[in-house]
Image (cartoon, grey):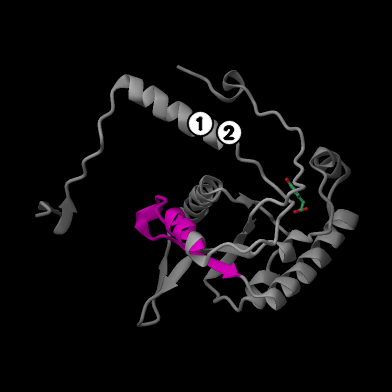
């Protein structure tokens, strides 16, 4: 029987976390790092089908992320329908073309040159699924009262991190795509006023010909300061 104790009138359950030896801690942390270090942001997707249940598991993993006051202020829209993907691609490319041609600074375009991006986004149709993450700034209660969510960007950002880790762990690839502005996603997907598009993440198998820029990650010394 699950033990329960009351705190502020709310039930608390006992949480037991495995206690590993220092050797096991070392091994587990290293294995996880080495696996995550193999994750790459990819743009060359295969159209090979992926079972829906895999996506369900990935979404459930994302939703285990911590969130302000446990409000879980996210909605994951999964687009599989080819006509809808085409509509999203057309709208995204129109915004991206305007951005690359007129809105982005010279410095920004120069920074993107080694990444090899441009306004064309064929992966929005090739990838079997587009996961569009929406952040929910408030909830509307049954009586019409608007209830604010807390630390929404932080919460949704962490959930997206979990989502990307789950996609990589499953053996699939993803791209964190941020067409800008991305209000067109609210219109196409008919989202309510409390939801704002946060990230568009195509998911699928890597294409046989999948190429990524030869990027190096910062060293531990560059990313950390110990006191
Ligand atoms: N949103 C554009 C541009 C872009 C911006 C950054 I910062 C990137 O790291 C990559 C792309 C696009 O998706 O092409």
The stretch in magenta equals 55-79
Pointer 1 residue: 33
Residue 97 image position (x, y, % from top left): 86, 61
Tell me the quarter of the picture where residue 81 sits. bottom right
User: In this rendering, is residue 82 above or below 176?
Assistant: below
Camera sees residue 25: yes
- 163 inside magenta stretch: no
Residue furthest bottom in the image: 143
- Badge 2 marks a residue whose secondary structure is loop
Circle 2 packing at 10 Å, graded few (<14), some (14-19), many (20+), is few
Q: Residue at x 77, y 43 (%)?
A: 211
Q: Which mark is residue 37?
A: 2
- Tell me where residue 145 appears, x and y as whole percent: 39, 77
Apparent side of residue 71 relative to residue 104 in the rendered image (left or right): left
Q: Nearer the viewer, residue 64 or 111?
A: 64
Instruction: Quadrant for the N terminus, please.
Output: bottom left
Label number found at residue 64: none
Q: Is residue 73 magenta?
A: yes
- Rendered image quadrant of residue 23: top left
From what the image shows, is residue 34 above or below residue 83? Answer: above
| Marks 1 & 2, CB-CB < 8 Å contact | yes
Looking at this view, is 51 or 145 the one in front?
51
* Residue occupying image coordinates x 10% and y 51%: 3
Q: Nearer the viewer, residue 21 or 92?
A: 21
- Residue at x 69% of width, y 74% of height: 82
Under circle 1, the secondary element is: helix
Residue shown at the point (56%, 68%) measured from the top left: 77
**Side (left or right) of 139 relative to 127:** left
């Amino acid at each position: 029987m699950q033990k329960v104790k009351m705190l502020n009138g709310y039930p608390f359950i006992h949480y037991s976390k495995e206690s590993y030896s220092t050797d096991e801690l070392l091994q587990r942390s290293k294995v996880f790092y080495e696996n995550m270090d193999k994750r790459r942001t990819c743009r060359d997707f295969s159209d090979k089908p992926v079972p829906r249940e895999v996506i369900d598991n990935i979404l459930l993993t994302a939703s285990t992320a911590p969130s302000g006051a446990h409000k879980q202020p996210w909605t994951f829209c999964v687009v599989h329908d080819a006509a809808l993907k085409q509509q999203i691609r057309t709208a995204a490319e129109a915004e991206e073309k305007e951005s690359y041609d007129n809105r982005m600074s010279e410095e920004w375009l120069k920074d993107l040159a080694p990444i090899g991006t441009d306004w064309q986004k064929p992966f929005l149709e090739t990838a079997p699924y587009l996961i569009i993450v929406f952040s929910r700034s408030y909830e509307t209660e049954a009586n019409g009262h608007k209830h604010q969510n807390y630390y929404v960007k932080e919460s949704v950002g962490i959930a997206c991190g979990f989502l990307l880790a789950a996609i990589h762990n499953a053996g699939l690839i993803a791209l964190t795509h941020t067409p800008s502005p991305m209000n067109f996603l609210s219109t196409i997907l008919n989202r309510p006023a409390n939801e704002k598009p946060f990230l568009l993440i195509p998911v699928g198998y890597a294409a046989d010909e999948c190429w990524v820029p030869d990027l190096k990650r910062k060293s531990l010394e560059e990313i950390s300061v110990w006191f």
